[in-house]
Each structure stands twice: as C-alpha cells, then as structure tokens.
Amino acid sequence: MSHPLVGMELPDIREVLGPEQPAYRAKQVYEAIYRSQAPELIQITALPLRLREELASSHAVGLPEIARVYESVDDGTRRYLLRLEDGRTVETVLMPEGERDTICISSQVGCPVDCKFCMTALLGLERSLTPGEILGQVMLVCRENRLRRDGGRLNIVMMGQGEPLLNLSNVLKATRILLDPAGFALSPRRITISTAGIIPKIEELGRAPIRPKLAISLNASTEEMRRELMPITRKYHLKELLEVCRRYPLRPWEKLTFEYVLLKGVNDTDADARRVVKLLAHINCKLNLIALNPGPDIPFETPAPERVTAFQQIVRRSLPCFVRKPRGLDIYAACGQLKRST
Ligand code: SAH
C-alpha cells in the first residue's frame, strides 16, 4: 500500500520524512510535487538516492486514475471520469477556450443538497473528497493536457459534483496549496468556489486568510420559489443568505458572483428579473445566467434564447450580467449534468 503525498502541506510532509531529516528536505519534496509536478517520487533528483528509494517504497505522488475520458465534438470540452483509491468515481471537466483554460473540479462524490434541477442531486452523497483528491483533479488534468498555468491562463472553478462548503476544511487545504507561490502558484483571482448557500460556512470562508472567490447559486427571485427549487432554503433562508452576502468581507479587487439557472415558465419572467435586481441591490456583485441544461428525470425545460436575452437586458441596467455558455452538452459535462453517466 503506497500512501499518497498529494494534498499534504509542509508539516504533513515533515512528519512523513521523520525528525532525522533536515527541514529543507520537506520543502524539496513539496516543491517537486506541486511546483515542478514530478510524476514519480523516484524522480525527485534533489533528494539523495537512498531517501528517494525509501520514500518511493512507502509513498507515491498519488494522483487519481483515469477511468474514462469523454471529449465533446462541439467545443473541445473534456469530461474525465476519475477513479479514487476506494474504487469510487468522480468527475472533472476541462473547458479550453482561446487563451484560457478552465478546470471544473468536484468536492464530493455525489451531493447531499437536493436542488430539483440538478442531476448530481439524484446521486445523493457518497462521501467527501480528501484534500489530495481535490487537488489531484487539477494536477492530473494539467499533466494530461500539458496545461500552462502562467499569465493567468488557468482558472479553477469548484462547481463540479458536491457542495464545497460542506467539505470546507479539505477544500481550503487544497486551495492553500493551489495558491501557494512555492506550491501550485495560482493567483487567488483564478479560483472560484460555488455554494448553494450554507450560511455559517460562508461566514467561516470569509474568515479564512487564504481563500477562493465566492459564487452563490441564487436560482429564484422569491423565498417561496427558492424553497421549492432548492429545499435547503428551508434551513438557510434567502433573506439571511443575502444578508450574509452583504456583510461578506470582499477583497479590494473582488466582487461576489451570483448564478441563476433559468427554468422555462418557472423563474424566467421579466418580473423575476426585476425582483432579482432588487434582491441584489447593495451587494457588490455580478450575475451569471445559465439556461437549464436538461437531463433525464429533470422536470424542467430550457427557456428560448430570446427569453434569456430579455432577462439579461433587464438585469444589465442595474448590474453586470452575463450568460454562461453551456460547455460539453453532448457529453453530459455541462452545469448540473455531472452524474457519472457513461
Ligand atoms: N453545490 C454548488 C456547486 C455546484 S455548481 C452550488 O450549488 O453552487 C453548479 C452550478 O450549476 C450551480 O450554480 C447550479 O445552480 C447550476 N446548475 C445545477 N443544475 C443545473 C442544470 N441542470 N442546468 C444548468 N445549471 C445547473
């Protein structure tokens, strides 16, 4: 059994190496794994051969295994089905676009939040991912596609399977390594976490010194409608959610993002758009619209493109508002479609 090192921070690696090793050895291993992305421990030539051999006999870098890759013929999106150590599988999506690559990663296997328009909800929660499994998705997709992460090319969104704020400590540990200049060295502007609205965890996230940007799935224009579409609203009311968002400690360069899935005839009228504007007044934010990505067993329809545009036009008078393009629809890789389908 070889234990994975991916997901470990310096103190964890120090412990693995033992007290007889000088402290700089842990730093060498850390930088080799995250900054240089050594594929195998035996290749960390900064270490003496004996130490390398010893380490490689008990440990491994430990990236997940690729079970299958689905490639979209429409837009080059790739959906990875990854196999974890316990045999469970989870999904990661790479969306290349011109000068930019975006990797959408999962935080849990399945999801415990039962949003009525989302296919992942149909899986239920199997378990949360470890820091190494969260980070491993990024490292694996980068390695497979030889992605460059310099010059702000690479973006990470925690919008795959799962509710990341219900796995906050592991998500934050992975984030620290991704943002560490001696680690994966991404800019904090390049990582976004998305939540269905777990109020106490939003406050906890706001207190973390090193954290991703925050996106909130709004998806309704009234308390009652949100309770229907996202039953978690019964526990965490929309009114209080927006209050916490107003108080959220944004960094000087930062805006909140709200996401809104448009469901035909349900939450997509002009009146909804006007109510959304009112809800978001006094919050420094932008709104991303997503026309429903349909799926079997999802009892909603996608609005016509003209309806989406009309909704956007109304919101745009008051705040920045964008329409998110669906990516990888043909391979079930788009928002709300991650359900390990083959
Ligand atoms: N649990 C987190 C992370 C998942 S993000 C969250 O709820 O934010 C996934 C985004 O896709 C969310 O904004 C969600 O509202 C949206 N979404 C879910 N199902 C969808 C569907 N069928 N079509 C379009 N967007 C969907």
Image: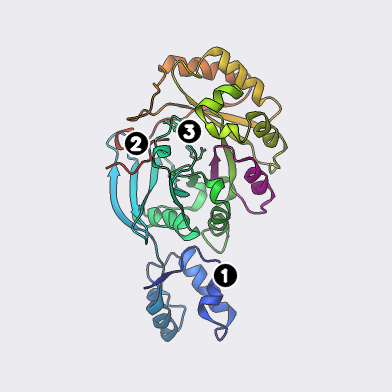
- Dividing the picture into quadrants, the one containing residue 275 is top right
Say which label, 1 or 2, has the lower sequence index: 1
Q: Position of residue 141 (x, y in %)?
A: 38, 53
Q: In the rendered view, tell whether residue 168 sits above or below residue 31.
A: above
Secondary element at image label 1: helix
Is 276 displayed left or right of 281 in the figure?
Answer: left
Q: Position of residue 197 (x, y in %)?
A: 59, 37
Is 85 displayed left or right of 283 in the figure?
Answer: left
Amino acid identity at mark 3:
Cys
Q: In the rendered view, tell whether residue 52 sits above or below residue 122.
A: below
Q: Position of residue 71 (x, y in %)?
A: 29, 42
Amino acid identity at mark 2:
Gly
Circles 1, 2 touching at the beta carbon (< 8 Å): no
Q: Which residue is mark 3?
A: 115
Q: Which residue is drawn at the image coordinates 58% and 47% (left, top)?
A: 212
Is 110 displayed left or right of 213 in the figure?
Answer: left
Secondary element at image label 3: loop
Q: Which residue is mark 1?
A: 10
Q: Which residue is mark 2?
A: 328
Q: What color scheme is it?
A: rainbow
- Disc nearest the viewer among 1 and 3: 3
Q: Which residue is drawn at the image coordinates 33% and 49% (left, top)?
A: 81
Say which label, 1 or 3, has the lower sequence index: 1
Q: Position of residue 233 (x, y in %)?
A: 58, 32
Q: Which residue is drawn at the image coordinates 51% and 68% (left, top)?
A: 31
Name the residue nearer the viewer: 106 or 74.
106
Amino acid identity at mark 1:
Leu
Say which label, 2 or 3, has the lower sequence index: 3
Give the magenta-colored segment's residue range: 191-211
